Structures are given as C-alpha cells and as structure tokens.
Image (tube, rainbow, N blue to C red):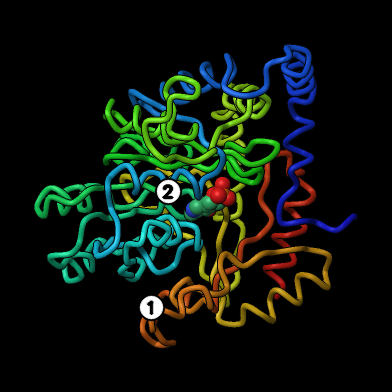
Amino acid sequence: MEKIMPNRLDRGFYQYQEEFEKKAIEVLRSGWYIMGKELEAFEREFATYIGSKYCVGLASGLDALWIAFRALKISKGDEVIVQGNTYIASVMGITLNGATPVFVEPDEYFNIDADKIEEKITSKTKAILVVHLYGQASNMSKIRALCDKYDLKLVEDCAQSHGASFDGKTTGTFGDIGCFSFYPSKNLGAFGDGGAIVTDNEEIAEFIRIFRNYGSEKRYHNKIVGANSRLDEIQAGLLRVRLGHLNEMTDEKNKLSLRYLEELSNDKIVLPKIRKGATHIWHQFVIRCPYRDELMKYLDEQGIGTIIHYPIPPHLSEAYSYLGMNKGDLPITEEYADTVLSIPLYNGMKKEEQDYVISRINAF
Ligand SMILES: *Cc1c(COP(=O)(O)O)cnc(C)c1O
C-alpha cells in the first residue's frame, strides 16, 4: 500500500472534479477575476449557510481575524482573552492591532475552558476570541453569558469549524464577528488562500467591505486607509462548488471519525471527546498519547503520516517572546502541545486505509 498521508487534498478534488473544472474554465473565460459575480454569490450563499446576515470575502483567515479586531476598534492597551492552545494566527489577529493576548487554558475538549475565563478579565479586557479548535464548537452558552455580564465583544475563530454548532446555533453567529479561513486543508477549502467574516451588524460588514479594497467604496475615492484583502473570483467560484457539497463532505468525515472512536482501542492513547450540546465537524481527529513522539515515529515506519497541531504553543514561540512568558505558565496548554497527534482523516479516505491505521495504532 502507498504511504497513508495525514491529509489528501487531491482526493477531495477528484470527488467533484467535473464541477470544479467546469467552474474554473467558466471564470477563466469570463474575463473578470476580482470582485465580481462569483464573490457576490458566494458571500450570499455562505451567509445563508452559516445563518448570518452578512458575509464579506477576504484574502485569508488571518486577514479575517486582524480586520475583525480592527473593525471593533481594538488596539494598543486593550486585552483580548484567547485560549493558549491555538494556531498562532488567532493570536496574530489580536497583536497585529497592537492589542495584548491574555491566554486561558483549554478544557478536555481542546477548547477554551469557560470556567477559567472570568479570573482573567480586567478593566482592559475588551473581547474574547473563541477558537472552535479541530472542528468542535466551544461552550458557547457560558462564554456568551460572560460577554454579556462584562460587556465584552465576542469574536469567533471558525477557521476549523465551518458549520459546527452549539445548542443548534452555528459557530460564527454567537458574537459580533465570525472569522473563517478557506485555506485548502480546511473543511471548506479553496484551491489557494481565502477567508471571510460573517456578521449580523451592517456597519461592521460595510466597514470591512471598504477596508478590504484600499478603503474605497467607489473606485479612487478612498475613505480610510485599508488593505488589499480580496477573495478572487476563481476561488469564490470554486468555493461555491464545494459549499454545495459541504454537508455530505462533513457527513463523510463524521462517519470516518465515529469509526475511529469505536474501533481505536489502546490504553496508551486518549481519544477525543464530544461536548454535550456541541457538534464536531472533525477538521482534525486528534488523539493524545504520553509517548507521542515514539508513536509518531512508529506510525511513520509503518507507512502512516501524522501531524502535530501544534507543537509550540503561541506563548512559547519566538514571535511572542516579547510577552515574557515561560514554560510552565500554561501547563495544560503545554501538555497538549507535547501529547497531541492528528491521525489521517480526509474526504475520500478508503476503508482499507482506515483499517490499516486502526490496526497499527491498536498494535502500538
Ligand atoms: C488556518 C487557521 C487560521 C488562519 O487561516 P489562514 O487562511 O491560513 O490565514 C486561523 N486560525 C485557525 C484556528 C486556523 O486553523
């Protein structure tokens, strides 16, 4: 058998090859490549899918995050609460605006521990950034209540949670702004970079629509200093094709993940848990193992590739050495960084591939 990779983007392409190729050619032949009808249609369709009033397409998930905090006027001197165990882009969204991240430890579901947020709120706290990590919705009833109690803005990093919900409400709709990435490996992935924000607030949507295009509403009439952060027509068109199949793609990943949960059995590993009231779209299937590095090496020798999401938590990365944090400051976050492992999971995964991964992990 050929080596089993942690992810196979080619399989996701071939599942709907004809539709993707037809759309790509249609856009190429249209002669219109930026800010056109594909983007408009995608924004409408994605807003409907999420259940938000507005969607604004952007160039990446990181742009969605930093522009979201910009729109909320969060800047130097302000604090934003975020979980310690996230992809570093979440934190960059905060610090690119000059604001300070305040880290909170995760719960057993890998999301922010809602019971540890209140003790971190100060007079400088302006917002909470919730990351629905690995595809599972966070404890949104508690977090929403805290934001109401302390009058905080709520931003959701939904880069890994397209369509996941808590108590029947879709992630991205709980707060002021939901931020999405369409990086190719995400559950709703483009064929290049892409991102978007969703919001119910017309003023915020309008600000971001202007900001992403050099701050101009009308060509050459610049109201504010903005950015160039636009979602290309070709990516928007291809995302529309994929969005049309997203529910069946999520179902497929859900079935594969449920099979892992049922059939993986090894007392050296801890399986992921599903929170009551939350749905999980399985961006990643993340196990924990105290012998993680040995397990990773063993699986690699057996022809199975795995990835660590993420080996260095943001507070210990070189980029954030200026925050002055040290090893031991966030023990749970750091333990996760030392023990998590994402095993192969992708659309188009074959039964014999999964059989083999299960048998090798169980034999470790
Ligand atoms: C991928 C990701 C981002 C960044 O998205 P890009 O489109 O790669 O900029 C932000 N936050 C999380 C949690 C992510 O997984």
Separation of disc 1 and disc 2 at Cα?
A: 20 Å
14 displayed left or right of 151: right
When asked about the image quadrant of residue 128, the answer is bottom left
Pick the residue in front: 52 or 202.
202
261 vs 299: above or below: above
Q: Amino acid under label 2?
A: Leu
Point 36% across, 26% down: residue: 51
Would you say the beta carbon of the disc 2 residue lies within 8 angstroms of ligand 1?
yes
Pointer 1: what residue? 323
Specify the quadrant that holds the C terminus: bottom right
Q: Which residue is mark 2?
A: 65
| Residue 258, visible in the rendered structure | no
Task: Identify whether 344 is placed above or below 341.
Answer: above
Residue 279 visible in the snapshot: yes
Q: Residue at x 70, y 36 (%)?
A: 191
Q: Position of residue 253 (x, y in %)?
A: 60, 42
Identified by mark 1, the residue type is Leu
Determine the secondary structure under disc 1. helix
The x, y position of residue 15, in whole percent, is: 75, 29
Mark 1 or mark 2: whose residue is earlier in sequence: 2
